[in-house]
Amino acid sequence: MAKNSRKARRRVDVERPLVLVLLFVVVVLFAVGGVVQGPKIARIVHSEIGMRGVEAHAPAIVKVASAAGLDPALMAGICYVESRGKLDALSSKGAMGLFQLMPSAASDAAQRLKLNPPTKAELLSNAELNARLAASHLVWLHKLEGPEWERTLVAYNAGRGKLKQWLDAAGGWERWRATRAGRSETLHYAQTCLAYAERFRARESFAPASAVPPTESASAAAQPPRR
């Protein structure tokens, strides 16, 4: 894992000059485009920088996702929204690393994988370990909250306890989703993760996983509706 982490850092170091060039382009285009086009251009370049940050960790993400039976592009989409590929990302709430794992989720995942509890330093420096724990957490959530990945990602972001409160109050997933469309930051989070997963697939940045969970449509056809 340490070797892969060093490789990822070297790749990020190589990417830095390109990032600086992109930032320079933003400044120039902002000046040329003015206040109308400038912000739009800035958002595009900001997104590109973030996607390249995630792609710097492609080897670790593909390896971990494939081993867990997950789509690497889906994990890449989550990684983009969570940290934009910043290995040492630390939130004000204590979420850590590429996949912004909370200490409790990281410890539970480590226990499932029969690993030692990860330290804060490891979660902020070891890309493969952070991704591996995140993959375990995602698989666990998907078994409990699937087959919809959107619902699974809402649980990843808000926690299963909070999601249950919302669904109990609304009368189920479909009702909650319908009433919160366009109004829920957590639902927007899940949809953004899925949208960026599609963008990574289109870029062919991540090789397909060898074993991917059933699609939502196939799973939904095989299973009764969830509350």
Image (cartoon, rainbow, N blue to C red):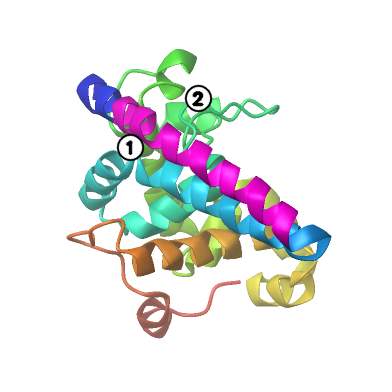
Q: Secondary structure at mark 2?
A: loop
In this view, the mark in front (2 or 1) = 2
Q: Is residue 13 left or right of residue 100?
A: left
Magenta-colored segment: predominant secondary structure: helix
Give the amino acid type for the residue marked by disc 2 in the picture: Asp
Instruction: For label 2, count other residues whose C-alpha is less than 10 Å away and answer few (under 14), some (14-19) or many (20+).
Output: some
* Residue drawn at x 61%, y 71% as measured from the top left: 227
At a point 69% along the width and 49% down the height, the residue shown is 162
Residue type at the position of mark 1: Arg
x then y, percent, for residue 1: 23, 25
- Residue at numbered disc 1: 132
Q: Is residue 183 above or below residue 1?
A: below
| Residue occupying the point 41% across, 51% down | 76
Label 2 vs 1, first from the N-terminus = 2
Q: Position of residue 205 (x, y in %)?
A: 31, 57
Q: How many marks?
A: 2
Per the model, the C-alpha gap separating discs 2 and 1 is 16 Å
Residue 106: image quadrant is: top left
Query: What residue range appears in magenta?
Result: 8-32
Q: Which mark is residue 88?
A: 2
As drawn, the label of residue 81 is none
Q: Could one spot residue 164 in this view of the protein?
A: no
Say what secondary structure mark 1 lies in. Answer: helix
Q: Please say whether residue 189 is one of the residues in the magenta stretch.
A: no
